[in-house]
């Protein structure tokens, strides 16, 4: 893995200690020896925990759960010290398992590795879904580590997130709680109302106990139109997505502070309907989306299956400023 990512520096003691301990763990035939070797693995960060998950669980999973490598190439000056800022590999994977009695729930777990010369990141996560009567309860937890340049202590700078969701499909209602570092960061609930001709109206109030910020989102969806209104004490915003035909969607957005945004989405493969389900899956989507923010920027995203290209151009009126960003990403499944 380290050779493939292009690391030319000398491996640290923790790297060798991890792989040496893992090799002894897998080669040992006695359970007692395995426990002894496992206790010698010194996980200095979540990077090593994610590597263990990939080695232990990835080899025993089906082909559909194999890790996915995303490689992003960014525009910029290339040098030997920060090459990972412009050649950005990301390795991720998701695994699923059905838990039997007494829990009887569905389990998902995975990891994400993103090496970088300045801000390397790593996260491991899991999600448990259980059906109780007609209520679906989903609990998710994630640990993310963005180690500083000079790491101090074990698991330094670790961020923990919790996501709890309760849903009732027949009543079309759901509630959600987000917590970060053992502190509630957001509360929200959603209620949907089915109208005539498959139209739908949605109400979604939200509240952040940390910042005491509250807002509410109103949505109205038809087969060809989607209206979204977000209102708070500080700002109000309305967005209207209109499907022109099977390929084109226009989305203007106007805010009370005067900001105006115009987005144009063109599907490379015709699909119907765009709203209300029935569209392409994200991994198979093929589209070009252009977002114009007057006197700010032009953002273009071109996605064609596993390929994804993004161009961001800063503008001021009709003048194009320097500092354009270009990135190209390719996803590869092993």
Image (cartoon, rainbow, N blue to C red):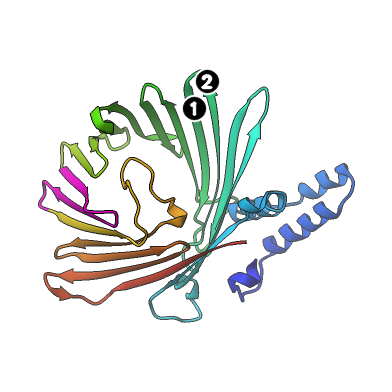
Q: Quadrant of the N terminus?
A: bottom right
Front-lying residue, 243 or 114: 243
The picture places residue 59, in percent across and down from the top left corner, at 71, 53
Q: Main secondary structure of the magenta part?
A: strand
Q: Is residue 109 left or right of residue 281?
A: right
Q: Could you tell me if the residues under marks 1 and 2 are in contact, i.e. CB atoms within 8 Å?
A: yes
Front-lying residue, 300 or 216: 300
- Closer to the chain start, of discs 1 and 2, is 2
Residue, x 38% and y 27% (percent of image)? Answer: 174
Q: Magenta stretch containing residue 32, yes or no? A: no
Question: Crowding at label 1, few (<14), some or many (≥20) Cα neighbours within 10 Å?
Answer: some
Q: Is residue 273 left or right of residue 180?
A: left
Q: Is residue 11 left or right of residue 148?
A: right
The picture places residue 240, in percent across and down from the top left corner, at 19, 46
Look at the image and tell me whether residue 294 can be seen: yes
Q: Is residue 261 above or below residue 124?
A: below
Label 1 element class: strand
Q: Is residue 297 above or below residue 203?
A: below
Q: Which region shows up in magenta?
A: 236-258
Q: Quadrant of residue 218?
A: top left
């Amino acid at each position: 893995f380290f050779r493939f990512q292009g690391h030319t520096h000398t491996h640290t003691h923790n790297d060798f200690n991890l792989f040496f301990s893992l090799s002894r763990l897998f080669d040992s035939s006695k359970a007692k020896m395995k426990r002894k070797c496992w206790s010698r693995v010194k996980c200095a960060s979540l990077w090593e925990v994610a590597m263990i998950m990939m080695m232990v669980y990835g080899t025993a999973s089906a082909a559909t759960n194999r890790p996915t490598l995303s490689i992003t190439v960014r525009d910029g000056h290339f040098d030997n010290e920060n090459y990972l800022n412009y050649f950005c590999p990301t390795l991720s994977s998701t695994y699923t398992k059905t838990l039997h009695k007494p829990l009887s729930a569905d389990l998902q777990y995975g990891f994400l590795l993103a090496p970088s010369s300045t801000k390397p990141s790593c996260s491991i996560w899991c999600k448990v879904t259980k059906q109780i009567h007609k209520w679906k309860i989903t609990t998710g937890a994630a640990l993310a580590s963005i180690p500083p340049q000079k790491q101090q202590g074990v698991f330094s700078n670790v961020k923990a997130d919790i996501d709890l969701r309760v849903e009732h499909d027949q009543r079309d209602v759901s509630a959600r709680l987000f917590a970060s570092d053992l502190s509630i960061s957001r509360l929200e609930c959603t209620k949907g109302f089915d109208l005539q001709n498959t139209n739908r109206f949605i109400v979604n109030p939200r509240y952040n106990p940390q910042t005491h910020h509250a807002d509410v989102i109103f949505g109205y969806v038809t087969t060809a139109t989607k209206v979204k209104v977000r209102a708070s004490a500080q700002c109000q915003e309305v967005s209207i997505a209109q499907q022109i035909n099977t390929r084109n969607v226009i989305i203007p957005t106007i805010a009370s502070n005067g900001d105006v945004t115009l987005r144009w989405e063109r599907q490379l493969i015709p699909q119907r309907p765009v709203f209300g389900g029935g569209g392409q899956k994200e991994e198979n989507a093929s589209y070009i989306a252009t977002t114009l923010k007057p006197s700010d920027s032009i953002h273009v995203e071109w996605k064609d299956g596993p390929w994804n290209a993004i161009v961001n151009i800063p503008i001021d009126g009709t003048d194009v400023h320097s500092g354009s960003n270009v990135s190209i990403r390719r996803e590869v499944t092993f």
